[in-house]
Image (cartoon, rainbow, N blue to C red):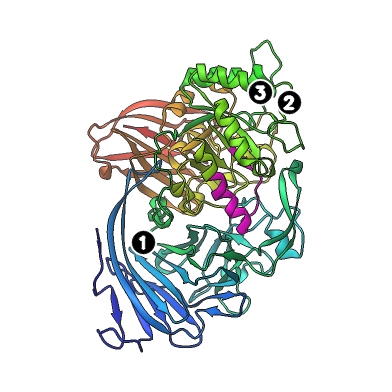
C-alpha cells in the first residue's frame, strides 16, 4: 500500500510548514534508525547519513555536469518537494525468496532547472538518484559521486585487473573482467592509480558496515570507485567515457576494443530517471547475507509471461576439460562427448548441458560457423528426447553483430539460451548491450547467463530470463592460479558481491584439497577446502542457473554427493541469515516448499559453532546432515552423511579448516 501525506518522515528544520526558503531536509527510515540530511544551503547540494547517531556518510556533494556547462546540484534552489511512504509487497521471480517487503520513506526534491533528486530511506540503507525533465536529449559529461567518512575506516576493495586496453593508466582499467579478490586496507591507503569495481564494503564504528553499490543501471555507464586525492577519508566515483572508436579484437577476436573515447560519459533522453546510488547498512554482519535493496530498486519485469523461464542446474564441461573415463571414444569437443554429458544430465535430473567455448570455429566470431566435430541439430534433438536443454556459449562480438538472427535461428532450432562472455566493459554502450541482449533473448524465449560481466544491478528483475552473472572471482581460477586464497574469498563475497545479485561461481568440485596440498592443474582441477564446503556452497551462493563444474565420471564415482547437488533447488521461497562474520564464516538457511536447507562454510580456521534454528519454525526435528569427516583436515574429501535429531532447535557443528556443512529438514 502506498500513502502520500505530510508525515513525520520529513522534519523541516525551520518550521513544520512547507516553505520555499527551506534549506535543510531530513528523511528518516520507517523505524527511524536511519536518517538522511540533505543540505541545499551553499554552492553544491550535499547529503549525510547516520544510523542511530553513528555517522555513516558525512557531508558529501551530489552533482551532475552536462555538456552545455549546466551543473545539476550546483547552487541548488528547491521549488517544491514530494513525500511518500511506501509499504508494499513485491512478488519476486526466480529469486531467493518468494515475496519481498518494500518499506521506505521517500523524499523528492524538485529543483529550479527542470531536475529532481529522489532519496529513499529504508531500515537497512539509503539510496538516491537524479531525475531530469528536459524536452530534448542531453549529454552527461560527469556525475559527481562522493562518499565522505568521519574516520579512516577499513575498506574491502576489489581492484580492477585490467586487460590489455588502450589509453592512459585509468582508461586501460575500463577494460576488465570485474574479477578480483579483496584488498583489505584503510581508506587512506587505497592506491591512487587503481580503480575498484562495486560493490565495496566499509567497516565502520560499533561493528557497523556499509556496502556501496548501484541499482537499475540502464542506458548509463557503471561506476568505479577510487580514493579522493583531494579530501581525507573520502572515496569518489568515476565512469568510463562513451566509446568513440571501437574495433573487433581482444580474446580470440570476440570483443569490442575501445580505441578512443568521447569527452562525456553518456548521451541520454532529456526526461529520465538515472541509476540509484545505494548504501546498504548493517548493525551486524549477518544482516548483509539476506538483503534485497538492489532487487527492490530495479525496474519491474518487462516480460509479460514468465512461465517459460526455467532455472536449474547445468552440466558444464570447460572446467573439467571435457574429461570422462570408461568410454570407447576420445573425449573432447565432439558429439560423442556431449551425448555423454546429456546422458549424465538426464540420469541425474539436471536441466541443462552447456556447450562452452570451442563449438564454433575459433577466431571467426561467427556463431553459424560450427566446427565439423559438432552437429548442433543432432545434439539438440538428442537432448530434447532426454528432457535436457542445450545452452550455447557466445562471445560478445559474435552474438552482438547478428543478435536478432542468432536468437531467432537457435530458438527455432530448440536451443534454450546463451552464456554470453568476454564483454569486459560497463561503459554506456556495453550496458545497453546487456539490455538489448536480454530483451531480444526474451522475445525468442531464451535464457541468458552473462560472463565477463559487471556486477548485477537488478537486470534479473527487469528481465528475469537473465538468470545469472559472473562478476565474481570464481572457482575457475583454481585451474591456473597457484597463489590464490579462494577459501577466504568465499567467506567474504556473500557479505559484499552477493548483495548485488546472483553469481555464477561454478562450484561443485569432487577433487578437494587442503591448504598445503592444493595445486593448480588445468585438466584435472581441484577446489580448496573440504568436500562439504563444495556441497554447502549450493546453499550459500545465490544462483538460479547453477553449474556442476566437475566431470560426469567424478560425479558418478561420488554418487551420494552428486544426488544431493542435483536435487537441491536453485531458487527459493524463503531465506534466513543465521550467522556470519565477514571473511570468517557464513551460515544461511533457505526454504523451498516444505524443505529447509541450512549451509555453512568457514575460512581456514577450525570452527565449532552452536546454531540457533528456532527462526525456521521446523515441523520435524530430524535432519540429513553432511559434515566434515574426522580426517578432513588431512584428506579434504573426507565427509560423513548422517541422519540426526535436533534437540531444542540447537545444532552444534564442527567445521574443519576450509570446511562446511549442510542440513536438510
For disc 3, the neighbor class at 10 Å (few under 14, some 14 to 19, many from 20) is: some
> Mark 3 or mark 1: which comes first in sequence?
1
Nearest the viewer among 398 and 654 is: 398
Residue under label 2 = 371
Q: Which residue is mark 1?
A: 124
Quarter of the image containing the N terminus? bottom left
Q: Position of residue 394 (x, y in %)?
A: 64, 37
Task: Residue 660: say if magenta.
Answer: no
Question: Which span is picked out in magenta?
Answer: 419-438
Disc 2 versus disc 3: nearer the observer: 2
Q: Secondary structure at mark 2?
A: loop
**Whole-Å distance between the Cαs marked 3 and 1?**
46 Å
Q: Residue at x 66, y 65 (%)?
A: 241
Residue 111, horizontal then vertical, whole percent? 43, 79
Residue name at image x 59 percent, y 57 percent: 158
Residue 651, given in percent of the width and then of the height, sits at 32, 39
Where does the image place residue 41, in percent across and percent down from the top left?
43, 87
Residue beneath disc 3: 323
Amino acid at each position: 500500500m502506498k500513502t502520500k501525506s505530510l508525515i513525520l518522515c520529513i522534519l523541516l528544520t525551520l518550521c513544520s510548514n512547507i516553505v520555499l526558503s527551506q534549506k535543510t531536509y531530513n528523511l528518516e527510515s520507517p523505524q527511524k534508525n536511519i536518517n538522511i540530511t540533505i543540505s541545499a544551503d551553499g554552492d553544491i547540494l550535499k547529503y549525510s547519513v547516520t544510523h542511530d547517531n553513528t555517522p555513516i556518510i558525512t557531508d558529501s556533494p551530489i552533482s551532475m555536469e552536462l555538456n552545455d556547462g549546466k551543473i545539476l546540484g550546483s547552487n541548488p534552489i528547491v521549488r517544491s518537494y514530494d513525500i511518500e511512504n511506501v509499504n508494499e509487497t513485491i512478488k519476486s521471480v526466480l529469486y531467493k525468496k518468494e515475496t519481498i517487503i518494500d518499506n521506505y520513506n521517500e523524499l523528492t526534491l524538485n529543483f529550479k532547472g527542470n531536475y529532481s533528486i529522489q532519496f529513499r530511506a529504508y531500515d537497512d540503507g539509503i539510496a538516491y538518484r537524479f531525475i531530469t525533465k528536459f524536452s530534448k536529449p542531453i549529454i552527461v559529461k560527469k556525475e559527481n559521486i562522493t562518499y565522505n567518512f568521519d574516520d579512516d575506516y577499513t575498506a574491502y576493495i576489489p581492484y580492477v585487473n585490467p586487460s590489455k586496453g588502450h589509453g592512459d593508466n585509468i582508461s586501460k582499467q575500463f577494460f576488465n573482467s570485474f574479477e578480483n579478490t579483496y584488498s583489505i586496507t584503510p581508506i587512506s591507503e587505497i592506491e591512487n592509480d587503481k580503480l575498484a569495481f562495486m560493490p565495496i564494503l566499509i567497516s565502520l564504528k560499533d561493528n557497523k558496515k556499509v556496502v556501496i553499490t548501484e541499482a537499475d543501471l540502464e542506458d548509463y555507464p557503471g561506476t568505479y570507485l577510487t580514493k579522493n586525492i583531494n579530501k581525507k577519508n573520502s572515496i569518489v566515483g568515476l565512469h568510463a567515457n562513451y566509446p568513440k572508436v571501437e574495433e573487433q579484437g581482444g580474446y580470440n577476436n570476440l570483443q569490442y576494443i575501445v580505441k578512443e573515447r568521447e569527452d562525456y560519459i553518456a548521451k541520454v533522453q532529456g526526461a529520465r530517471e538515472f541509476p540509484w546510488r545505494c548504501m546498504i547498512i548493517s548493525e551486524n554482519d549477518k544482516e548483509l547475507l539476506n538483503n534485497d535493496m538492489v532487487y527492490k530498486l530495479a525496474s519491474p519485469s518487462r516480460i509479460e509471461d514468465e512461465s517459460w523461464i526455467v532455472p536449474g542446474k547445468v552440466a558444464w564441461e570447460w572446467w573439467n576439460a571435457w574429461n570422462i573415463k570408461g568410454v570407447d571414444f576420445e573425449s573432447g569437443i565432439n558429439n560423442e562427448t556431449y551425448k555423454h554429458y546429456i546422458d549424465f544430465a538426464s540420469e541425474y535430473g539436471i536441466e541443462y548441458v552447456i556447450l562452452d567455448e570451442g563449438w564454433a570455429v575459433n577466431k571467426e566470431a561467427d556463431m553459424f560457423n560450427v566446427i565439423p566435430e559438432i552437429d548442433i541439430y543432432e545434439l539438440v534433438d538428442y537432448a530434447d528426447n532426454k528432457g535436457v536443454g542445450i545452452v550455447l556459449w557466445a562471445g560478445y562480438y559474435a552474438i552482438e553483430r547478428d543478435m536478432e538472427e542468432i536468437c531467432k535461428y537457435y530458438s527455432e532450432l530448440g536451443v534454450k539460451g546463451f552464456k554470453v562472455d568476454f564483454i569486459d566493459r560497463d561503459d554506456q554502450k556495453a550496458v545497453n548491450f546487456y539490455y538489448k541482449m536480454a530483451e531480444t533473448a526474451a522475445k525468442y524465449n531464451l535464457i541468458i547467463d552473462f560472463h565477463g560481466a559487471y556486477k548485477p544491478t537488478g537486470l534479473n528483475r527487469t528481465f528475469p530470463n537473465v538468470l545469472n552473472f559472473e562478476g565474481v572471482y570464481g572457482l575457475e581460477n583454481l585451474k591456473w592460479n597457484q597463489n590464490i586464497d579462494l577459501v577466504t574469498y568465499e567467506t567474504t563475497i556473500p557479505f559484499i558481491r552477493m548483495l548485488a545479485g546472483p553469481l555464477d561461481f561454478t562450484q561443485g568440485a569432487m577433487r578437494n584439497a587442503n591448504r598445503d596440498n592444493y595445486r593448480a592443474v588445468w585438466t584435472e582441477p581441484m577446489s580448496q577446502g573440504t568436500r562439504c564446503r563444495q556441497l554447502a556452497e549450493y546453499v550459500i551462493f545465490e544462483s538460479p542457473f547453477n553449474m556442476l563444474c566437475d566431470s560426469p565420471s567424478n560425479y558418478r564415482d561420488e554418487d551420494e554427493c552428486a544426488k544431493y547437488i542435483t536435487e537441491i533447488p536453485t531458487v527459493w521461497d524463503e531465506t534466513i541469515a543465521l550467522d556470519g562474520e565477514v571473511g570468517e564464516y557464513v551460515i544461511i538457511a533457505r526454504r523451498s516448499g516444505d524443505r529447509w536447507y541450512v549451509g555453512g562454510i568457514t575460512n581456514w580456521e577450525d570452527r565449532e559453532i552452536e546454531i540457533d534454528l528456532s527462526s525456521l519454525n521446523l515441523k520435524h526435528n530430524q535432519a540429513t546432515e553432511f559434515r566434515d569427516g574426522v580426517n578432513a583436515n588431512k584428506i579434504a574429501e573426507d565427509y560423513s552423511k548422517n541422519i540426526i535429531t535436533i534437540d531444542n532447535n540447537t545444532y552444534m557443528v564442527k567445521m574443519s579448516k576450509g570446511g562446511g556443512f549442510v542440513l536438510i529438514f
